[in-house]
Structures are given as C-alpha cells and as structure tokens.
Image (tube, rainbow, N blue to C red):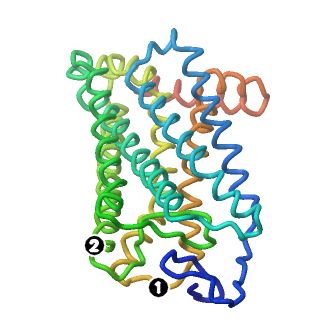
Amino acid sequence: MNRTDGSFYINHTNTTDSGFSEEKPQASIAPPILFLILGTLGNGLVLFLLCRFSGEHKWRPFYRFVLALAINDFLGIALAAPFGIARYASDFTFTFSHGLCDYMAFIQMFAILNSACIVLSMSLDRFIAIVFPLKYSVSAKERRAHLLLMFGGAISLLLSTVPHLAGRHSRSFYPGSWCFVDFKSDTLIDRGISLAYASAGFIVLCLVAVLNFSVIVTLVRQRCLTGNERKQQKSLSKKSKQMIAFLFAIVVLFAVCFIPLLINVFARPLRILQGMESFEVLGLRLAYVNSVLNPWLYILLRKETVMFLQRFPCMRQCCRTKDQENTTESVSL
C-alpha cells in the first residue's frame, strides 16, 4: 500500500497480508451509482429513439455515428461500473484480482478512446458536408462512415490490448475501484504504453479541434453571403443545424472531460505529476461524465424536444425573439 497526501491507491504488486491494518478511503458510493443509472438509462433511451424513428432519419451517416457512440458508452459503463460499485458496497474490503483488473482496464481504455474516435469521425463527416457539400452529396457516405468506425475501433482495440499482449498487468487506482494502464510504473515498457495511449488521445483531440474550427469558419463565411448566394445556402444550414449543434456540444463536453485523464496518463510517466490521487479519480469520473451526458445532449437537442420546450412561455418568447432577430438580419442584407 502506498500513501500520498493522506490517500492511498492499491498496487497489485504489493499485498496487504502483512498484518498491518489497511486504511479505508473516504469516498462516497453515490457518484458511481449515479453514473451507472444515468449512463445506462440515457444511452438505452437513445438506442430506442434511434430505432423507433429510423424511418425519419433513414440511418444517415450522422445517426450511424450517434448509434455507435451510444452503444460504446452504454457498454463501457455497464460492463465496468458494477465492479467498482461492488468495491464501494463492500466498504472497500473487496479487491480486484489481476484478471478482473486487466478486464476492467481493457473495457475502460477501449470505451474512452473509441468514444474519442467516434467524435473525430462525426467531426470529419460534418467537415466534409459543410466545407465540401458537392463532394459530400455524391460520395459513398454510408461506406465512409462504416470505414471510419472500423478504423477508429481497430486503433482503440490495438492500444487497449497492448498491455496484455506485452504481458503487463494493469493497475488499480485510488480508491481501488478502477483499473487502467499502469502509468505510474517505473518500467520503460509501461511508461511507453502509457505515452502511446495518451499521445493517440491528444492527436484525436487536436484533429477534432481543427475540423470543427474549420466548420465554424465556413459557417461564418456563409452568413456573410448576400442575395442569391445566401438563399442557396439557407436550405443546407437548416438541414444541418441540429447536427451541428449536437456535434459542437459533444465536442466541448469531450474536450473538457477527456483532457484531465490524458494529462494523468501522459504526465505521470514523464514524472511531471506526483501524488494527487484525487486528480486521478477526477480524470476517470470526468470520462464517465462524458459517457453519461452524451446521450442526454442528443435527447435534449432533438427537434421533438425543442418543439416540446417551445410550448413553455419563456422558451416560446426566447424563440420568437431569435426569429425576429434573424428576420431583421435577412432584411438588412
């Protein structure tokens, strides 16, 4: 058992059978239970809505990405979170075996990185649709979507299985309720695996930022068009408005929730960060928050939800004001 700043994490290379009493972490069971309930409920509801209204969206590429994201987040939470809750429920007397810890690490590493790759695929799809609309309309969109999903899944699978292929065990981190690649190890192979995983995450994050910045620039330029040019672009912007709003919300949430975990996995092998076990927990919990909130963003930003909210006086007044501003703007142009 290692202690830092009054907290501890469990290292499977050290046993606790030496007769010394083990200090129990002061952590609440409420967050993991909340994540499990909201995550499975939200992603399950998204899967139901996508299948229920498949006749309307006709499984266009964007909705295929949403489907993949919902399945990935649902399984990532449902297959790993119950074991963490079991440790909380046992008052931290239940500890993970090597096999269980390796399993949890694989599930969490794959789900987190694959979620990032799906967001990148969505961003690339919207980038082509907005920046190169003619090329997008005549291309094999569904085939490209499937290839992007398979490529992202293959990369995530490879990086998630490297520790096991290299014969390395994962590590259980404070408060012993989650496992990940051993980014605290002193061995070069563990540090190399950690840096490779974090580097892939940072590359995905940068590509997502570049693609969405390009989309924003293109949309701003379209708003500056006048006359017939603006009328030609109007129908396109209406069709893609919901998709772009959802994508931007997903990207912001993804960046906020993904960066702390990447900092942990990247900085600790370089010995930049020491201690701060609470920051490790924050990184994983934010990654779970990302998987929990993704489906609720889709549910809230659906056209039917927006129309329902417009029934309330305050929301209706807000929408009227916005419509008046848009009308005034179009007249002035």
Dots 1 and 2: beta carbons under 8 Å? Answer: no
Residue at image coords 32%, 64%: 167
Q: Quadrant of residue 310?
A: top right
Residue at image coords 56%, 81%: 15
The x, y position of residue 203, in whole percent, is: 29, 56
* Residue placed under numbered mark 1 in the picture: 274
Residue 2 shown left or right of residue 35 in the figure = left
Residue at image coords 71%, 84%: 23
Pointer 1: residues within 10 angstroms few (<14), some, or many (20+)?
few
Give residue 163's mark: none
| Above or below: residue 2 compared with residue 212 | below
The x, y position of residue 291, in whole percent, is: 55, 46
The x, y position of residue 230, in whole percent, is: 34, 22
Q: Residue furthest top?
A: 55
Q: Is residue 1 visible?
A: yes
Type of residue at label 1?
A: Gln
Q: Is residue 256 visible?
A: no
Q: Earlier in the sequence, mark 1 or mark 2?
A: 2
Q: Quadrant of residue 259?
A: bottom left
Residue 13 versus residue 80: which sits nearer the camera?
13
